[in-house]
Structure formats: structure tokens, C-alpha cells
Image (cartoon, coloured by chain):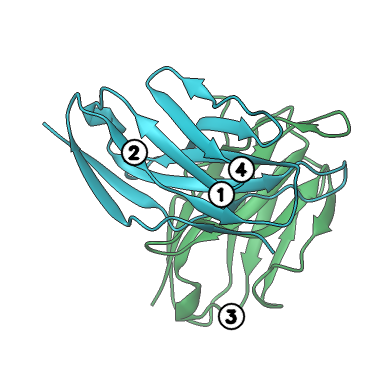
């Protein structure tokens, strides 16, 4: 399967614990995005990487959220000291830039559903 | 900042019939893309159709077509000959046609749950 892969698919954690999610993009895609989707809402942009550089992180919800893409391939999203309000689906997407203004469509993974109890 | 509004939280349609999902958006930009994404239950979001704002011709992909009204900032999706597999949440989304280095993230509406009835 050459699509976007996310792991784990489901995570249940106790409030206050740290969690980390992984995303493996489509191999030739240089852009990687993280979104959060709460029940009944559309995905909300969090951050993105071009290769290994995190070029936009102002939309991360708080300083408890951080993301990395150390070698420009897979990415991790970490949430420290989880709160019940962090319960949501966390989606990863990837795309490939083609020239100055062109971009392929974004391909999404199946998401990681986080439940904080 | 741009916003995307989907005013129909739920819709249903009989199999083989046609249904139209509505979307409006607000932006001060002139160069952008609009998309419809489909999210089936417990499955990943997939692109249904894409429209470049600079193109006047409405995009079409098999049974899916759009009615893009740029002046009205309206972007509706028409599904013809509805099939049971079309049952899903449908999201309208906006993205700037921006220069390299810009985020180019998608801004989504809140979605419309479409149910195709047998």
C-alpha cells in the first residue's frame, strides 16, 4: 500500500499522559500536513512541513503540541499532558510541490482517533 | 481569513437520483482552488473533484460535477445517479493558489452527511 499511513489508528490515554502519533507520507511527497478533526466538524489545520523544515506552526493549539519530521520522511505529532479536550481525530496528509505555483492534491491517511479519559 | 460554510448538516437521496450539496466561502483573494472531499465511515478522506478559480468552466468527474459561481462565492456539488457507495460525509474545502513556501493548507467546511437510500 503506497498511501499515507498513520499509527496507531486508535489511542486511549489517561488525562495528563503524553502521546505520540506517527505519519508516513507517500514516499515522493515533500509536503506533510497535520490536521485535527473533532466530531461533526471539518478538519482544522495544525502545522505543515516541507521536507524536514516545519514552515508553519502557529496553528498548533498550545505549547503542549509539537511535531517533527527529522529526515523529511515520516513525521510525529506529540501531545504532552493530555486533556479531555484533546480527544479528536488527528489526520495527516501529504502532497508534492511541482514548480512555483503547482501542487498535487493532498492525500490523507485514515487518522489516529485519540480518546482522553 | 477565509471561511467555508456548508449549511446542510445532513441530506438523503434515493439511489439513482440526483442530489446537490451546497457550499459558500468567503475570501478576498482571487487565485485559489476549491475542492470537494468525501470521507466514508472509518475510512480516509479522498478527493472527489477540484476547481481552479481562474477557470470559468465547471469541473466534472464522471457522476460528480460542480456549479462554481465565483461572484457569488458559491461552489455546489451535484451527484448524479447516486449509488449506495456515495454514502459519506462530504467536505467542501478552499486552498490558496500561493507561491512556493506558503502553507497551502486546506480550509474545510463543517461537512454534509449524505445518505443514499436503497
Q: Earlier in the sequence, mark 4 or mark 2?
A: 2
Mark 3 — on which chain does it sit?
A
Query: Which residue: 43% across, 61% down?
Result: A41
Query: Which residue: 83% across, 42% down?
Result: A51
Which residue bears the numbered disc 1? B72
Q: Is residue A104 above or below residue A34?
A: above
Report how far apart the C-alphas of labels 3 and 2 lie in the structure.
Answer: 43 Å
Mark 1 secondary-structure assignment: loop
Which residue bears the numbered disc 2? B20
C-beta proximity under 8 Å, tags 3 and 1: no
Mark 4 secondary-structure assignment: loop
> In the image, which disc is placed on residue A13?
none
> In the image, which disc is placed on residue B70?
4
Estimate the x, y position of residue B9 in percent, counting from the top left. 32, 57
Mark 4 — on which chain does it sit?
B
Estimate the x, y position of residue B34 in percent, counting from the top left. 60, 41
Q: Is residue A66 above or below residue A9?
A: below
Q: Nearer the viewer, mark 3 or mark 1?
A: 1
Image hue for chain B: cyan
C-beta proximity under 8 Å, tags 4 and 1: yes
User: Can you tell which chain is drawn green?
Assistant: A
Amino acid at each position: 500500500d503506497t498511501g499515507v499511513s498513520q499509527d496507531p489508528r486508535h489511542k486511549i490515554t489517561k488525562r495528563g499522559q503524553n502521546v505520540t502519533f506517527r505519519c508516513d507520507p507517500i514516499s515522493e511527497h515533500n509536503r506533510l500536513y497535520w490536521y485535527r478533526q473533532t466530531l461533526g466538524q471539518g478538519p482544522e489545520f495544525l502545522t505543515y512541513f516541507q521536507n524536514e523544515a516545519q514552515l508553519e506552526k502557529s496553528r498548533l493549539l498550545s505549547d503542549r503540541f509539537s511535531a517533527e519530521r527529522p529526515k523529511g520522511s515520516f513525521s510525529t505529532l506529540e501531545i504532552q499532558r493530555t486533556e479531555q479536550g484533546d480527544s479528536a481525530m488527528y489526520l495527516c496528509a501529504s502532497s508534492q510541490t511541482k514548480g512555483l505555483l503547482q501542487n498535487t492534491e493532498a492525500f490523507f491517511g485514515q487518522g489516529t482517533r485519540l480518546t482522553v479519559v | 481569513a477565509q471561511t467555508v460554510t456548508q449549511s446542510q448538516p445532513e441530506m438523503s437521496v434515493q439511489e439513482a437520483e440526483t442530489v446537490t450539496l451546497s457550499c459558500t466561502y468567503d475570501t478576498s483573494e482571487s487565485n485559489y482552488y476549491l475542492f470537494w472531499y468525501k470521507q466514508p465511515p472509518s475510512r480516509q478522506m479522498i478527493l472527489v473533484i477540484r476547481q481552479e478559480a481562474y477557470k470559468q468552466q465547471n469541473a466534472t468527474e464522471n457522476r460528480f460535477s460542480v456549479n462554481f459561481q465565483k461572484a457569488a462565492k458559491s461552489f455546489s456539488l451535484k451527484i448524479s445517479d447516486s449509488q449506495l457507495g456515495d454514502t459519506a460525509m462530504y467536505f467542501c474545502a478552499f486552498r490558496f493558489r500561493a507561491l512556493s513556501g506558503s502553507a497551502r493548507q486546506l480550509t474545510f467546511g463543517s461537512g454534509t452527511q449524505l445518505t443514499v437510500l436503497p
